[in-house]
Image (tube, rainbow, N blue to C red):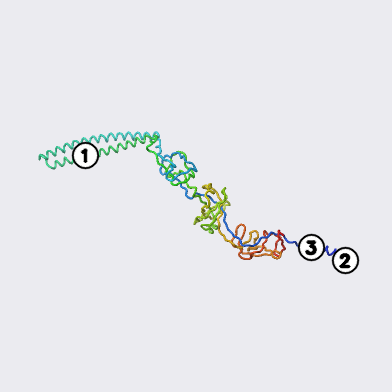
Amino acid sequence: MRRFFTALAVALALGLVVWAFLPRPVTVELARIAPRTIEVMVEEEGEARIREVYTLSATIAGKLGRIDLHAGDPVIAQETVVARIGPADPAFLDARSRAVAEATLAAATAAVDLARAEVEQAEATLEFMTSEAERARALFERSAISERTLDNAMLEQTTALAALHSARANLAVRERQKDSAEATLRAGVENGADTCCLDLIAPVSGRVLRVLTEDEQVVQLGTPILEIGDPATVEIAVDLLSRDAVRVREGARAEITGWGGPPIPAEVRRIEPIAVSKVSALGIDERRVEVFLTLRGDPADWQLLGHGFRVIARIELWRKENVLSIPVGALFRDGSDWAAYIVQDGRATLRTIELGERNESVAQVLTGLEDGDQVILHPSDLIADGVRVSSQDG
């Protein structure tokens, strides 16, 4: 009897030793392969812009009055006067220039006096030639002179009249030259109210975005003064990598976040047909394409989104429902292929998978798995083909 109990105790001890050294199942986290809706989005930093920004510039050179408008002030199309430009004061003359101007004025005054004397001389000549012509006509009527003599008298009268007209025209020219010389000497005199002003009118209704030239100053033709735009037409501009831009379609769904307010639904309005080269923060030369998004929903949700604000845009590249999918946490590389471990009869089994579209959470399964398969999430180095496993849920 004692031998029996002794043998039994030895058998139990050996059994415990064998059980202690048997490999235990690896505890794993499982996920189920099932059809899901997959959305593939691209996320990129963008900028809010008013679609049409109008830059008002000086249409003439002159003296710009101080701008009373400020950024954010409303304007009405064809009503609001945004700026006023008047003639600029002439430049002041230095001593040499003033001396030249005074000499020119003196010469112009003398020329006017000379022209007036010539007019008086021409008037006297015309008066004399007129009386001679009348006398010749009376003598011709009495047949005292020939017709040729009468014609000569009439010609001299006409010539005298033309000389008078020429003298008067010369006088007018000299007087204008004198006026010009006098105007040169009036540098620094304030412009009269009758010479002001040209008003710049707002071309569209909206708000002032930026005042570029606020203080009173002399401006040249084409000098930018201020910018006007309608905040209701704000849109989003996003620079996408060209490899992402080729997958974007007009009308695609998008979402705007990261601007300080609630997410805003949006839609792709236009994709630029060209790419430009830009250097990233890491110094990499990238080819980027500008994509424009139209905001949707209630405008009250994004009325505080201003021109030039930074945003984060998420644009839909691909979407499909009822797609057999696998969590990306279950995927790993097996050589050049994608693979995952499924659980069959309590053991891990390696499966090679062909994937389709993927996002940050799930990937489309084309081949290698079936609906209902259990895959191991985040497999550790302890997991290998054929290793016993157990679920964390028991």
Residue situated in front as seen by the camera: 302 or 331: 302
Q: Is residue 327 above or below residue 217?
A: below
Q: Which residue is mark 1?
A: 161
Nearer the camera: disc 1 or disc 2:
2
On screen, residue 145 versus residue 52, left or right, reads left
- Residue indicated by mark 3: 19
Q: Tell me the amino acid under the disc marked 1.
A: Leu
Instruction: Choose mark 1 or mark 3, whichever is in front.
Output: 3
Left or right placement of residue 232 versus residue 174 in this view: right
Number of the front mark, 3 or 2:
2
Q: CA distance from mark 1 to mark 3?
A: 144 Å
Q: Amino acid at mark 2?
A: Phe
The quarter of the picture where residue 127 lies is top left
The quadrant the C terminus occupies is bottom right
Q: Residue pushed farthest right?
A: 2
**Label 3 – label 2 distance at C-alpha:** 22 Å
Estimate the x, y position of residue 341 in percent, counting from the top left: 67, 63
Q: Is residue 254 above or below residue 82?
A: below
Instruction: Return the residue at label 2.
Output: 4
Q: Position of residue 147 (x, y in %)?
A: 13, 42
* Earlier residue among tags 1 and 3: 3
- Mark 3 secondary-structure assignment: helix
